[in-house]
Image (cartoon, rainbow, N blue to C red):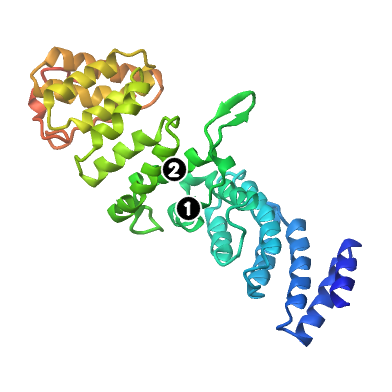
Amino acid sequence: MSFKEIKELRQAGKLEEALQRAKTVLEAAPDNVWNKRAIAWVYYDYLKKNAQSDSFDAFKETLIRIKELKLPEDEKMVFDNCAWQIGSLVFGLQKNEPVDYSKINELFDIIKDFHFTRPSEAYSFIYRAFHKGYQNWSQYLHFATWWNFEYLREGDFLKEDFNGRQVMSIAEQAYIAYSKKLLEGEPIDYNTGQQKVIDKEMIQSFLPRLDALIEKQPDYQYPPYFKAKLLLALGSDDNILSAFLPFAKQKRNDFWVWELMTKIFSADKDIQFACYCKALSLKTPEDFLVNLRHAFSEILVERRMFNEAKTEIQKVIATRKKMNGRYLTKFHNGQNRNGTNLRLLKKTTTTYTRVK
């Protein structure tokens, strides 16, 4: 009878009364699943009430209360309904500038033990919410590993319509985001974010899943590209070219495809040189070519093609000026990063210092 009474109080909007009644019956029989269920739904109503970024503390405390109930695994309806409120708050937190990722970390730590239905629309909503700010979120790899891409729904693999145009599916976005974060590495010290290291074991365990996606979704353009980059990060030459060629053929008119080819053929200087030439021959805004031209100028110096190197450097400087930025030379202590003597480069240009 108490469960029905508490439900009626909730539906009447008398949440405080419902909460006090639910606490009373739970204290009388703390192991009774109906009592736990009754107060869980009251807590859910409080989540709905506080699912805004300015009510974060109240939301978090309520979420902790739900966790402390230690509901059985089959109470998925409560958790699935909570998922929508959790996702809504996470989306809201990411609208603030700057984003307070410590709050997102706190929410993630709380929900790790929640028994969501997997796969489900609610569970996918959780992923979308936390995924939104993955670029700057240091805990993304831990979250995505916990969430587990095996629980993507069939609908998650379909392209979506956004403002009248199609965008890549959330599944493709997920695999790309995970690949990027693996390549980026994780900081040894999360406080400073410095000294990032690549976890090669995580890459090796992820590659079979990426292979399965590439086989299942041959129309996805970018997974082969990231497979090649992950193989390069492992320092393995096995299958890099075969993994990358299908993607390269589709994107052969994009400069960065040829830029990656220079890394794949790093041991063959002639092919590498040809790839740089091809990349720079394509129609590309100069803003995107600064790093590429800089790297190419170093190769030109190695080949003693000083006039050509000078041209590339001048283009870089001109682009930086146009962007109202600063061109900080990569040359230090008389040598560049590849060990080319700076005296050779002096034959190409006298501008090495900061250009304002």
Q: Position of residue 23 (x, y in %)?
A: 79, 79
Camera-nearest residue between 268 and 37? 37
Total marks shown come to 2
Q: Where the C terminus falls, by quadrant?
A: top left
Mark before the other along the chain sequence, 2 or 1:
1
Residue 166 falls in image quadrant: top right
What residue appears at the point 74 percent right and 69 percent down from the top-left corner?
40
Q: 10 Å neighbourhood of mark 1: few (<14), some, or many (≥20)? A: some
Looking at the image, can residue 69 be seen?
A: yes
Q: Where the N terminus falls, by quadrant?
A: bottom right
Q: Which residue is mark 1?
A: 144
Camera-nearest residue between 120 and 142? 120
Q: Amino acid at mark 1?
A: Ala
Q: Are marks 2 and 1 in contact (CB under 8 Å)?
A: no
Q: Amino acid at mark 2?
A: Tyr
Q: 10 Å neighbourhood of mark 2: few (<14), some, or many (≥20)? A: some
Q: Is residue 308 left or right of residue 282?
A: left
Looking at the image, can residue 251 be seen?
A: no
Residue 259 falls in image quadrant: top left
Q: Which residue is mark 2?
A: 175
What residue appears at the point 72 percent right and 84 percent down from the top-left corner?
30
